[in-house]
Image: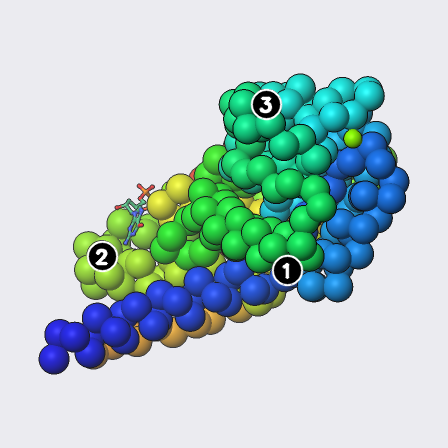
C-alpha cells in the first residue's frame, strides 16, 4: 500500500539524516566571563558527548568560531569586555555564521531584557542555574537541526560533495592556511570528456550515474583531509592541502587511469568514460580566484592536447 511506501521512504530519509548528523559529535562553544560557570557548562556538555570548548574572553570568540567550527554557541549576557548581544551582532554579521544557533545562558530574569538581548539574532534563552538535562537537551536538538541545515547548504544533492560556492570558500581558507603555515597546497579541476555524448547515447540518468560514480571514486581514492567539490555539471574541484605539485599530479593521474578502466553497464553494452584535469600549486601569493582560473586553464590545456590526461 502507499502507506508502506511512505513509511519506507521516511525511514530511508531518517537513516540518511541520522548518518549525517551522527557522523561526528556535536560541537559547542561556550563564552562566559565567569571561569566557574564556563567550566561547569563545559563539563556538563562534555559528559553528554558534546565536544565543548569554553572561553572566558569574548573578544576571542570569532577566532574560536573559525578554529573550532562549532554547531552552536552558548553565550553569557553580561561580560565586561564585550557583552552577549554585542557579540551576537558581530557573529550574525558574518555570512559564515548566519546559521549557527546562539543560546543565552544568563541569570537575567527580566523578560524584557531577555527579549531585547535576543533581538540581535539569538535563538533561545536559558536561565541560570540551568538543570544539566535541560541544557543538554537544548544543545542537542539545536545542534542536530543546525548541522542538518548546514550540510544541505554546503553539499551538492546528487553527489554529496561540496557545492560550487562552498568549495570556493574552502579554497579561500586553504590559500590563507597555506600562506600562514608556508605549506604547499594544490588545486585541481576535473572535467569529464565528451560527456554530452554519454547523455545523448545512453540518456541523462546514465550520465547522472557516471557523475555519482566519479564522485564516489574521488572520495574513496583521496585522503580524508582533501576536499572535493562538484564545481559544475560534470566538473569537479579538489583541494589537496600539504601536497607538492609533482605528488598531486601523480595522485590525479592514478585516479584518471583507474577511472578510465571502469566499465559501466549501459543498456546491453558497456560504457567507459575518461576525464581531463588541470593541477596547479599555490605559490604563496595568488588569491583563490586566480588559482581557480589557472587550474581551469591547465584543464583546458589537457582538453586541447587530446583529453584523458592531466596537465600542470
Ligand atoms: P568536453 O570533453 O569538451 O568536456 O565535452 P563535454 O561534452 O563533456 O563538454 P560540455 O561542457 O559541452 O558538456 C557537458 C555536458 O554535461 C552538458 C550537459 O548536458 C551535461 N550535464 C551537465 N550537468 C549534468 C548533470 O547533472 N547530469 C547529466 N546527466 N548531465 C549533465
Ligand atoms: Mg557574566
Ligand atoms: Mg564541462
Ligand atoms: Mg566535459
Tell whether label 1 touches label 2 (CB within 8 Å).
no
> In whole angstroms, how far apart are the C-alphas of marks 2 and 3?
57 Å
Measured as percent of width and height from the top left, residue 270 is found at 30, 74
Q: Is residue 125 left or right of residue 105?
A: left
Q: Nearer the viewer, residue 42 or 202?
A: 42
Q: Give the residue at x 56% y 64%.
A: 22
Sequence-first tag of 2 and 3: 3
Sequence-first tag of 2 and 1: 1
Of badges 2 and 3, the one in the foreground is 3
Residue projecting furthest to the right: 35
Sequence-first tag of 3 and 1: 3
Q: Nearer the viewer, residue 114 or 272?
A: 114
Q: Nearer the viewer, residue 59 or 218?
A: 59
Q: Secondary structure at mark 1?
A: helix
> In whole angstroms, how far apart are the C-alphas of marks 2 and 1?
51 Å
- Read off the residue under disc 2: 204
Q: Give the residue at x 33% y 51%.
A: 194
Using the rendered image of the protein, determine whether residue 190 is visible from the camera's viewpoint: no
Residue 126, quarter of the rendered image: top right
- Read off the residue under disc 3: 113
Amino acid at each position: 500500500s502507499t502507506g508502506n511506501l511512505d513509511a519506507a521512504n521516511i525511514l530511508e530519509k531518517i537513516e540518511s539524516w541520522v548518518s549525517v548528523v551522527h557522523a561526528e559529535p556535536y560541537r559547542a562553544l561556550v563564552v562566559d566571563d565567569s571561569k566557574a560557570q564556563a567550566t561547569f557548562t563545559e563539563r556538563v556538555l562534555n559528559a553528554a558527548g558534546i565536544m565543548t570548548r569554553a572561553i572566558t574572553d569574548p573578544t576571542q570568540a570569532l577566532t574560536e568560531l573559525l578554529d573550532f567550527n562549532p554547531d552552536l554557541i552558548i553565550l553569557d549576557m553580561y561580560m565586561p569586555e564585550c557583552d552577549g548581544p554585542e557579540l551576537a551582532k558581530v557573529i550574525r554579521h558574518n555570512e559564515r555564521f548566519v546559521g549557527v544557533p546562539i543560546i543565552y545562558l544568563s541569570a537575567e530574569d527580566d523578560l524584557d531584557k531577555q527579549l531585547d538581548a535576543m533581538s540581535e539574532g539569538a535563538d533561545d534563552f536559558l536561565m541560570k542555574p540551568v538543570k544539566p538535562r535541560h541544557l543538554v537537551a537544548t544543545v542537542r536538538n539545536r545542534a542536530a537541526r543546525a548541522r542538518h541545515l548546514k550540510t544541505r547548504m554546503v553539499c551538492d544533492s546528487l553527489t554529496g560533495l561540496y557545492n560550487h560556492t562552498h568549495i570556493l570558500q574552502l579554497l579561500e581558507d586553504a590559500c590563507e592556511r597555506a600562506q600562514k603555515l608556508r605549506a604547499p597546497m594544490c588545486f585541481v579541476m576535473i572535467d569529464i570528456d565528451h560527456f554530452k555524448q554519454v547523455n545523448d547515447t545512453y540518456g541523462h540518468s546514465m550520465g547522472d550515474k557516471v557523475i555519482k560514480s566519479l564522485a564516489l571514486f574521488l572520495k574513496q581514492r583521496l585522503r580524508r583531509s582533501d576536499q572535493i567539490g562538484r564545481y559544475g555539471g560534470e566538473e569537479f574541484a579538489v583541494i589537496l592541502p600539504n601536497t607538492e605539485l609533482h605528488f598531486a599530479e601523480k595522485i590525479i593521474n592514478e585516479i584518471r587511469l583507474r577511472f578510465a578502466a571502469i566499465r559501466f553497464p549501459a543498456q546491453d553494452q558497456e560504457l567507459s568514460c575518461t576525464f581531463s584535469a588541470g593541477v596547479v600549486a599555490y605559490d604563496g601569493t595568488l588569491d583563490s580566484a586566480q588559482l581557480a582560473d589557472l587550474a581551469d586553464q591547465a584543464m583546458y590545456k589537457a582538453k586541447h592536447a587530446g583529453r584523458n590526461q592531466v596537465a600542470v
